[in-house]
Image (cartoon, rainbow, N blue to C red):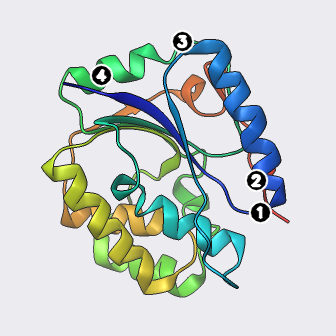
Amino acid sequence: MKTRGIVWVVYGDKAAMEARLSRESARNMSDLPHVVITQDFGAVDSKIASRFAKTTMLRDVPFTQVLYLDADTRVNGDIQHGFDMLDDGWDVVMTASNSQDTDLMWHLKDEEAEATLKELAYLPLALQCGVMFVNRNQRTEQFWATWHDEWMRYCDEDQGAFLRALKRVPLKLWVLGRPWNGGAVIEHRFGMVRS
């Protein structure tokens, strides 16, 4: 039996405030159960803790179908269609990043950006990991473990690690349009949780 739920990873005061507003917006649009992941990592800074938790989240949620939302998102429309795509057999449903071509991986440290492009051996479509619908299955479980391994190489941003993991563990990935991450359905207030 499928169980669906929404998950946030929350570290730091700004993220907690934003996540509270995100959760309120989600409750206005859906009666799905919610989980907030916020483990104590001691002295680790909020950014590192949140990336660690995000790349391991499947082991911490009880749902078979997950909508992951960054803390700085607002749900303004019907999210059912993302879950419908999971029902159609897609592993992950997400949007492309606004940063492509010459802006690709601008936020990664040079060493990681160069290594990622070298390992991929092609110019990838950058994906935005702040809103993701996920089907829990053998592929996504393996992918999340690989994503975490790739993230641990640099312990910084998560998008380069996501692309490297995708090369190692291909997924059935559906790419949604801008309304789903930064638009009318799910607004993304990029950067609101950063110091």
Q: Are marks 3 and 4 in contact (CB under 8 Å)?
A: no
Viewer-side label of 2, 3:
2
Q: Which residue is mark 3?
A: 78
Q: Are marks 2 and 1 in contact (CB under 8 Å)?
A: yes
> Quick one: SS at disc 3?
loop
The first of marks 3 and 1 along the sequence is: 1
The first of marks 1 and 4 along the sequence is: 1
Q: Which residue is mark 2?
A: 15
Image point (62%, 72%), residue name: 40
Identity, as a three-letter code, of the amino acid under mark 2: Ala
Measure how far apart labels 1 and 4 are at the Cα level. Answer: 33 Å
Q: Which residue is mark 4?
A: 85
Measure how far apart labels 3 and 1 are at the Cα level. Answer: 29 Å
The circle on residue 147 is none
Measure how far apart labels 3 and 4 are at the Cα level. Answer: 13 Å
Q: Are marks 3 and 1 in contact (CB under 8 Å)?
A: no
The first of marks 3 and 4 along the sequence is: 3
Q: Is residue 52 left or right of residue 148?
A: right
Q: Are marks 2 and 3 in contact (CB under 8 Å)?
A: no
**Spot occupied by residue 187 in the image (x, y as percentages of width and height):** 69, 29
